[in-house]
Image: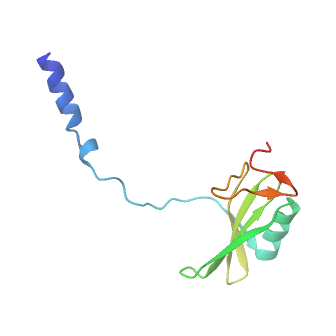
């Protein structure tokens, strides 16, 4: 029993439990980039329509969200006329706001 108590105390005193949570970090993520008109053409060919946009004054960019019956795409556009698809996916669910397109609930329409 003394041995078990010692191992438990040793385990709980390891540096893993004493460390602060990790800080933010950067990672490399592959993204598709092209002139803005080509990116927007590809997104609209998927049947997605503009849903929201926001500006990032710190990076001088405009982010665009396109939503369709089958998915979502987020585009980041730059002042030089280029843009990148920084995220895409399906099974979109908006918190605190129901999303309906063309009269259909696209959140649970799988």
Q: How far from the left and from the top, in percent, is residue 108?
A: 75, 44
Q: Quadrant of residue 56?
A: bottom right
- Quadrant (top left, top right, bottom left, bottom right) of the C terminus: top right
Q: Position of residue 80 (x, y in %)?
A: 69, 84
Residue 76, quarter of the rendered image: bottom right
Q: Which residue sits at x=76%, y=75%?
A: 35
Describe residue 7's horizontal placement relative to residue 42 as left or right.
left
Of all residues shown, which one is farthest toward the top? Answer: 1
Colour setting: rainbow
Q: Is 2 situated above or below 98? A: above
Question: Looking at the picture, does residue 56 appear above or below residue 110?
Answer: below
Q: Answer above or below: position of 9 versus 59.
A: above
Image mark count: 0
Residue 22 located left or right of residue 29: left
At a point 63% along the width and 59% down the height, the residue shown is: 30
Does residue 25 appear to the left or right of 58 in the view shown? left
**Image spot of residue 78 (x, y percent):** 67, 79
Q: Nearer the viewer, residue 34 or 75?
A: 75
- Pick the residue in front: 24 or 30: 24
- Residue furthest to the left: 2
Q: Is residue 8 above or below residue 82?
A: above
Q: Quadrant of residue 36?
A: bottom right
Q: Position of residue 1 (x, y in %)?
A: 14, 15
């Amino acid at each position: 029993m003394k041995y078990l108590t010692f191992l438990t105390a040793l385990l709980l005193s390891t540096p893993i439990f004493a460390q602060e949570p990790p800080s933010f970090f950067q990672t490399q993520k592959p993204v598709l980039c092209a002139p803005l008109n080509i990116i927007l053409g590809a997104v609209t060919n998927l049947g997605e329509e503009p849903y929201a946009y926001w500006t990032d004054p710190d990076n001088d960019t405009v982010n665009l969200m396109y939503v369709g019956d089958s998915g979502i795409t987020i585009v980041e556009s730059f002042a030089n006329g280029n843009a990148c698809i920084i995220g895409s996916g399906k099974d979109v669910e908006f918190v605190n706001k129901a999303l309906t397109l063309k009269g259909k609930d696209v959140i649970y329409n799988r």
